[in-house]
Amino acid sequence: MADDTSVKLRTKQLYCIFVRNHTKEGTLRALVSDLDRIKNLGTDYIWLLPINPIGEVDRKGTLGSPYSIKDYRKIEPTLGTWDDFEYLAKEIHDRDMKLMIDIVYNHTSRDSVLLKTHPEWFLRDDSGKLFPKNPDWSDVAELDYDNKDLWEYQIETLKQYAKVVDGFRCDVAPQVPIKFWEQARQSVSEVKENILWLAETTGGDYIKVQRDKGFWMSTDSESYRAFDYAYDYDIDQTWHDYINGKTELKTYTNALNNQELIYPNNYIKMRALENHDNDRAHKLFTNENDLINWLAFSEFQKGSSLIYAGQEFGMSHKPDLFEMDKLNWDKHELELSDLIKRMHELSQDSIQYMGAYQVTPESNDLVKVSFEQSSHIRVGIFTLRGNCGHVRVDLPDGEYTNLLDNKPVTVYRGIVEIEYGPVIIEGNV
């Protein structure tokens, strides 16, 4: 991890917005009307999916993917202008939030400004044709970072945005050489200090496939040399195997605990139940009680947290990236805003971003997460498949208060009885 990354960044909550689909107008300025509500969730950073012009050649769908970018240095006209972008940034800052934008540096669209002006900056096969490392990415042209002039152009672009924004979420960051990201971080810091760098890291299987083809791919450990945050895709397959009944809870909790050993001491994982690439959490967990427990468990894990717009209302439909697909803000499938806000409040306590952390599987698919600092302990217990049970905790017998709903919780003979809701209690050992 970047040596100067503060572990206090584990307290930050990100809120992700796809501008096209977020409001009726689908513009940058229209977002301003929703900022106060978003702020009230506990949001620290608003992350905008790419806001640059979208390519037309080999476009997917009617409107194209925001990740097929025609010009890094311009704003997509249907979203607004550069002035609109700066206006939104000011409104976000006026509410004591920060702005993060998506940076897509592995590839451009197939009719991009760079492809026209610098065709030598792109990856090609032996016949000179554009060559995608991932065959599914048929609408993009992949950049070749063997060209150091490309580095200079890309870093200058980041400096331009750094005058306005406070963070960069870097798409498929491991496919861009880590030395580029290290240089970019250093150069951008000369424009603005304390820029937050989030890497969309990838799972081990994908890393192996690309390395076998002879391409650069960073592991999460390597990514931490330049980035503050990394996705938790390193354990994503294990997580899906557990929720799909293909493996036991212990296998998943072992993977979580192993992150404590294989990453730097100040590592930060961005914890998320859903994002723009994956199914909504309410689609994965149709039982509402399970969804509540999984949300609380996810946000109680060590790291930062991500909310994908609409998740706070239990939306089960994932918006289409290639078509107009507006969020239905009138339909609240499950109200989760208060839980999100409370979990964020708890994450501000030093015990949760500095304390010793352990995840323990319990019987009946219950899981216990504990943080210890000095003689103090905070314990969260979550039922992941709607089961009741009994969980042993390292707290003296007595009456405690569930920090989520202020209801009493009894510890008797070192045991807590769990029904269906998440429980978080604390005390001195």
Image (cartoon, rainbow, N blue to C red):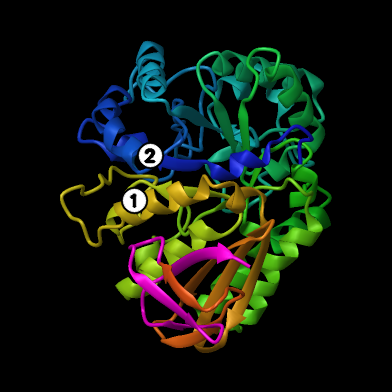
Q: Which residues are magenta?
A: 402-429
Along the line of sight, the residue nearer the viewer: 179 or 414:
414
Residue 354 image offset from top left, x and y in percent: 66, 49
The residue pinned by badge 1 equals 319
Q: Amino acid at mark 2?
A: Phe
Q: Identify the disc placed on residue 132.
A: none
Residue 120 image offset from top left, x and y in percent: 74, 24
Which residue is painted at 48% across and 43% down in the image? 13
Let me know if residue 417 is in the magenta part: yes
- Work out whether 106 lies above or below 429: above
CA gap between label 1 and label 2 equals 9 Å
Q: 359 left or right of 61?
A: right
- State which tag comes first along the sequence, 1 or 2: 2
Circles 1 and 2 in contact, beta carbons < 8 Å: yes
- Where's the C terminus, which quadrant? bottom right
- Where's the N terminus, which quadrant? top right
Q: Residues within 10 Å of mark 2 (few under 14, many from 20)?
A: many
Question: Is there any visible trace of residue 364 in the rendered image?
Answer: yes
Along the line of sight, the residue nearer the viewer: 338 or 259:
338
Q: 98 left or right of 199?
A: left
The residue pinned by badge 2 equals 18
Q: 340 left or right of 30?
A: right
Q: 86 left or right of 202?
A: left
Q: Say which element carries label 2.
A: loop
Let me know if residue 290 is in the magenta part: no
Q: Amino acid at mark 1?
A: Pro
Which residue is painted at 52% across and 44% down in the image? 348
Question: Is there any visible trace of residue 378 in the rendered image?
Answer: no
